[in-house]
Image (cartoon, helix red, strand yellow):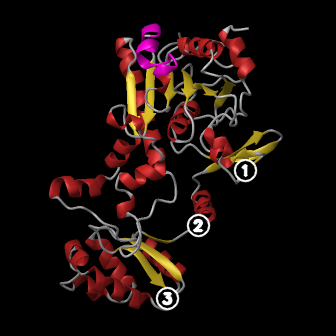
Amino acid sequence: MPGIDDPAPDDVSPVVRVTGPLDGLVVADFSRVLAAPMATMLLGDLGADVIKVERPDGGDDSRAWGPPFAQDESTYFLTANRNKRSIALDLSSDEGRKVALALIDRADVLVENFRPGTMARLGLGYEELSARNVRLIYCSVSGFGQGKGARLAGYDFLVQAVGGLMSVTGQPDGPPTKVGVALVDVLSGLHATIGILAALEERRRTGRGQRVEVNLLSSLLASMVNQASAYLSAGVVPRALGNRHPSIAPYEALNVGDHTLVVAVGNDRQFAAMCRILGRPELSEDRRYASNADRVANRGDLVAELERLLSGRDVEQVVAELVDAGVPAGVVNDLAAAFQLARDLGLEPSFTMQFDGGEVGQVAHPIHYSGAGVSYRRPPPRLGQHTDEVLHWLGIR
């Protein structure tokens, strides 16, 4: 069976050979929606052969999550499913399970995010599969873990609510607000990827696989960083502060006419430079603002003074002067302007792939390597597009 540390067999992919760091790795992807599919896509970007198992009647739930659509496929599905082959299997049937087991016997990694207990009821639980394939890395992604939270359905929005993220997001006098993207799913997908890669390294040393478990609630709590530390170490329960930072000032959005200027002043030197550019260098020596702790304590007065000094100024010119002086500053971009900024900086943030006679846009893999790195070999698949191909590869008629 091929492994990350073994030579890649010639038949891993009948179409495209790759030389990425995970070339030769076979991933059986039983996941859907976002968190776990993002993890498997990242593995695919790095060279793994990812085989996505989908139910025949509709496939991955996110295929129906639109509009918008591109080439009649949901753009939500397109975001996390490139570099994969799709096979349609009815896992409730004996024939479907037979094919699934044949795939798992050849796999290095299995990823699933069914409600806890579902895979075991299908005869595809970790205990059964690890006995068949001792080298298998079995990654389960759930909402609230495999214990008392197993019965709870885990969706990003729900976890943002019960996990505390919404309590620190939004305006102080407004309702709790979710983040504008499925951030908990993204974080959980990254944690799942890290866990899988660590388990593969352990397998290289021991020859044995293991189970990797990731849940959305724990991923969110681990990602609350300074907010979580304030609670655990100092007993401070954080609250929503709008665009302000609880421990740094000025680190917020400032009104400049019809525009919004964002400054992220992280030290006294940057604050002094900002005061100089705004024509009030002595402000940095005012006892109310001399240190960061002073500025946080007197934030209201400070923001009012800064907005007074900014009144009538050209926001683009102010940004240019602040950036030249080493002060982190910018305006609030929409997503189109954000991608253009990345292009202007030479970061190559996106690319297009051929898809059913047309093209679909994709966000580029964010990691760059000096050696073997990422490759974009396959566009997101249509449902069951590679069923015959994979069955032939598995030797099943």
Q: In the image, 251: left or right of 15?
A: left
Task: Give the Cα separation between the discs numbered 1 and 3.
Answer: 42 Å
Asked whether 365 or 140 is in front, the reply is 140
Sequence order check, earlier mark of 1 and 3: 1
Q: Identify the residue at horizontal 54%, vertical 79% (top origin).
A: 316
Q: In the image, 63: left or right of 356?
A: left
Instruction: Using the rendered image of the protein, determine whether residue 78 is visible from the camera's viewpoint.
Output: yes
From the image, tell me which residue sits under label 3.
313
* Number of other residues with Cα within 10 Å of mark 1, as a class: few under 14, some 14 to 19, many 20 or more: some
Instruction: Using the rendered image of the protein, determine whether residue 135 is visible from the camera's viewpoint.
Output: no
* Number of other residues with Cα within 10 Å of mark 2, as a class: few under 14, some 14 to 19, many 20 or more: few
Task: Give the Cα separation between the discs numbered 3 and 2.
Answer: 22 Å
From the image, tell me which residue sits under label 2.
334
Q: Identify the residue at horizontal 21%, vertical 56% (top origin).
A: 231
Q: Where's residue 30, x and y in %? A: 56, 27
Q: Where's residue 365, x and y in %? A: 56, 42
Under mark 1, the amino acid is Phe
Task: Give the Cα separation between the discs numbered 1 and 2.
Answer: 20 Å
Answer whether labels 1 and 3 touch (C-beta < 8 Å): no
Q: Looking at the rendering, in which quadrant would you find the C terminus?
A: top right
Q: Where's residue 194, x and y in %? A: 41, 34
Question: In this view, which residue lies farthest toward the left?
Answer: 234
Q: Which dot, 1 or 2, sits closer to the camera?
A: 1
Under mark 3, the amino acid is Arg
Q: Which residues are magenta?
A: 120-133
Asked whether 230 or 250 is in front, the reply is 230
Q: Quick one: SS at disc 3? A: loop
Which secondary structure is most common in the magenta stretch?
A: helix
From the image, tell me which residue sits under label 1.
69
Under mark 2, the amino acid is Asp
Q: In the image, 289: left or right of 120?
A: left
Q: Quick one: SS at disc 1? A: strand
